[in-house]
Amino acid sequence: MEGVCEMCKREVPTTSHHLIPKQVHSKSWCQRMFTKEERKERRAELCGDCHPIIHKFFTHAELAKLYNTVEKLLANEKVSNFVIWVSKQNKKAKR
């Protein structure tokens, strides 16, 4: 789906990223931290460059516990450096 990536702000195809990864939804700590609605609905539209890089940088547990909003992701130095770099690249994101 064509859209605007919530991280790099490029107008490119995007996919929906669960900010609280589905792989940890059944964990007791996750159920204590987030409501069922939060686990299901907290998402971000990310491009084919930004989406895989956050999965490369962080485990599912780290994403859920520490980086569960776009703002928290962008506050991480590795992520922000990547986003600065990718935002200057060709406007075509990977699919």
Image: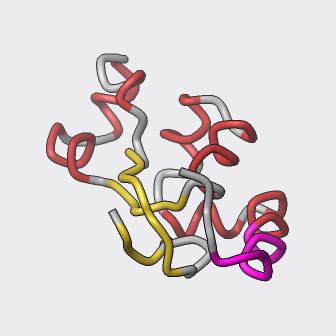
Q: Depth check: 24 or 47 in front?
A: 47
Relative to 66, residue 62 above or below:
above
Identify the residue at horizontal 75%, vertical 41% (top origin). Answer: 57
Residue 38 place in picture, x, y as percent = 23, 48
Identify the residue at horizontal 59%, vertical 63% (top origin). Answer: 72
Relative to 47, residue 39 above or below:
above
Residue 59 place in picture, x, y as percent = 64, 30
Dividing the picture into quarters, in which one does residue 36 lie? top left
Residue 60 place in picture, x, y as percent = 55, 30
Dividing the picture into quarters, in which one does residue 71 lie? bottom right
61 vs 81, left or right, is left
Relative to 22, residue 76 above or below:
below
Q: How is the image coloured?
A: secondary structure
Identify the residue at horizontal 65%, vertical 68% (top origin). Answer: 74
The residue stretch that appears in magenta: 83-91
34 vs 15, left or right, is left
Identify the residue at horizontal 57%, vertical 80% (top origin). Answer: 10
Residue 15 place in picture, x, y as percent = 40, 54
Dividing the picture into quarters, in which one does residue 42 lie? bottom left
Relative to 49, residue 31 above or below:
above
**Farthest-out residue, top:** 27
Quadrant for the N terminus in the image: bottom left
Q: Depth check: 24 or 84 in front?
A: 84
Q: Depth check: 9 or 1 in front?
A: 1
10 vs 24, left or right, is right
Count the numbered circles shown.
0
